[in-house]
Amino acid sequence: MDKNFYNQASAAKLGWDPSWFGEKYFDDKLVRAIKKWQRLRELAADGLCGPMTFRRRWTEKQAQVEEPEPEAAPVEEEEAPVVEEEVHESVPPTMSVGSTTMTGNTGPGDMLDLLDWTISNGDVLSMHVDEEASSLVIEIDATDDGELFVGLNADYIGSDDGTFFILVDNQEHEDYEQAGMDLYIDLPAGAETVEIFGSYIIS
């Protein structure tokens, strides 16, 4: 991936510029600056300003805005760009993961209602675990470039060393950020399958 091109496209879409990271141009110096900023905040240091990095940096910038003096004119707060997302909040499971009434052909069942997830510019069609591969398989319909957030739960899938391996359409995928058990995965338009590999599955 051309990281300079990605950052330039991301800036045009989300509304940021190199000065947010102390640089002037979309070049290798900017990539290194973003990596340093990400490491200090315990994000995946890939040098890419994706949606999660943008949101964290935007929040910091807002926190740095000084409060106006009592007699000064009110300062209008900048609104964060709205990214259209399908939002799903998990609900307490009403049956065990291994229930035969749940759907899913290769794992203990449908995980759509057991995990927190959101997707922008697309839809999640199904989500189930594959016990043999120790993975979570997510079928999606990505209508445009976007992001998939999945909040993993150690009650169902986990990793001994805290890291996960990701495939998108059966290809190794490194364009993601991890914060604990939360994964923020950049998706290309047309993507159909995301598979997240851990160390174990609990059924």
Image: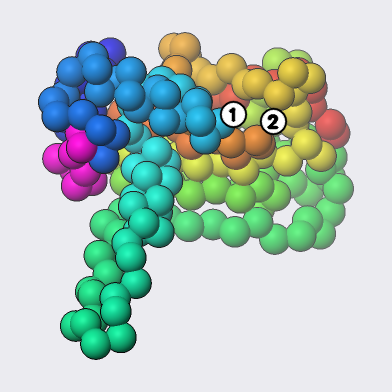
Give the CA distance from mark 2 to mark 1.
Answer: 6 Å
Main SS type for the magenta part? helix
Q: Quadrant of residue 182?
A: top right
| Relative side of 17 to 170, left or right | left
Position of the C terminus, as image quadrant, is top right
State the extent of the magenta-drawn residues as a range: 12-19
Residue 108 position, x and y percent, is: 77, 35
**Relative to the observer, which residue lies in front, 130 or 102?**
130
Residue 185 position, x and y percent, is: 45, 32
Q: Which label is found at residue 127? A: none
The structure residue drawn at horizontal position 78% and vertical position 48%, both measured from the top left corner, is 101
Q: Is residue 88 above or below residue 2?
A: below
Packing grade of label 2 (10 A; few <14, some 14-19, many >=20) is many
Which secondary structure, mark 1? strand
Packing grade of label 1 (10 A; few <14, some 14-19, many >=20) is many
The amino acid beneath tag 2 is: Val
Which badge, 2 or 1, comes first in the chain's sequence?
2
**Relative to the observer, which residue lies in front, 44 or 115?**
44
Residue 67 within the magenta-colored segment of the rendering: no
The structure residue drawn at horizontal position 20% and vertical position 33%, both measured from the top left corner, is 18
Q: Which residue is mark 2?
A: 129
Q: Is residue 90 above or below residue 57?
A: below
**Relative to the observer, which residue lies in front, 173 or 125?**
173
Q: Which residue is mark 1?
A: 137
**Relative to the observer, which residue lies in front, 113 or 157?**
157
Residue 16 within the magenta-colored segment of the rendering: yes
Q: Are marks 2 and 1 in contact (CB under 8 Å)?
A: yes
The amino acid beneath tag 1 is: Val
Residue 3 position, x and y percent, is: 26, 18
The structure residue drawn at horizontal position 42% and vertical position 41%, both measured from the top left corner, is 52
Residue 147 position, x and y percent, is: 39, 39
